[in-house]
Image (tube, grey):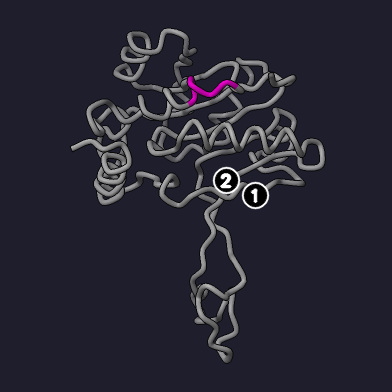
Amino acid sequence: MNKYKLTALVPMRHSSERVPGKNYRDFAGKPLFHHVVQSLLDCPLIDKVVIDTDSPIVMEQAAEHFPNVLVLERPDHLRDGGIAMNDVLLNCIEQVPSDFYLQTHSTNPILSTKTITEAIGKFFSLYPMYDSLFSVTKRNVRFWDSLARPINHNQNILLRTQDLPPIFEENSCIYIFTKAILERKHNRIGDRPFLFEMAEIEAQDIDVELNFIVAELLYKKLNNIL
């Protein structure tokens, strides 16, 4: 049993510019956001799941399918697509007190309860040595900046990509933080963050239509859905 109270936050907007209606669009047989919400509800280390949204469709479906989930209606001044996510989260944590918060996205539908539970367990086993956590994907590829300068390799020494020093991508699947960190830094990442490496296949994030197609195919393959 976790000695800290942990609240999971799932923010989602009604409108999406690049993939219209993606948060409630059908994904492998049910609306997209249902997948991650169910994964969070199934995690034994999460005390409460909170949805922040301006979507009447999400509100209606959450009330019908997830009665134990707290739904916060996003205020008008935070509904514009240009509003920083951290401002949305600050509004959430003011309304829902908790020792720690875990934030993920409805657009990470392959993220599993097992991985969420592992991330939480790892963080609390290391706290307070680490004050926050965010999930990453390890990349063994050659990166360059816009001026054609190598970032993670020596261009004069052609190492195999698998032998390159690892570089990590923030994949936006899992963040664990406190109210104090978010208020002080206006960021979910604290001064001593732990990088939680997770499987790339679970780190699919739906940002454009191609991501939706690929993620749904992967999900069906992993779950033997024809």
Image side of residue 222 versus residue 163, left or right: left
Q: Residue 135 carries which label?
A: 2
Magenta span contains residue 43: yes
Which part of the image, by quadrant, shows the N terminus?
top right
Residue at figure coordinates x 37%, y 28% from the top left: 35
- Quarter holding the C terminus is top left
Seen at 60% across and 15% down, the residue is 95
190 versus 139 height, above or below: above
Q: Is residue 183 above or below residue 212?
A: above
> Along the polypeptide, which appears first: circle 2 or circle 1?
2
Q: Is the magenta stretch mostly helix, strand or loop?
A: loop
Instruction: Provide residue 82's location: percent of width, then percent of height.
Output: 44, 40
Query: Label 2 crowding class (10 Å Cα cut-off): few <14, some 14-19, many 20+?
Result: many
What's the amino acid at mark 1?
Leu
Q: In this view, does 9 lie to the left or right of 17?
A: right
Q: Return the residue nearer the eye: 107 or 126.
A: 126
Residue for badge 1: 195
Residue 22: x %, y % from top left: 29, 35
Q: Quadrant of residue 53?
A: top left
Instruction: Identify residue type, mark 2.
Output: Ser
Residue sitting farthest toward the left: 226
The residue segment tinted magenta is 40-44
How crowded pointer 1 is (Cα within 10 Å; few <14, some 14-19, many 20+) is rated as some
Which residue sits furthest right? 129
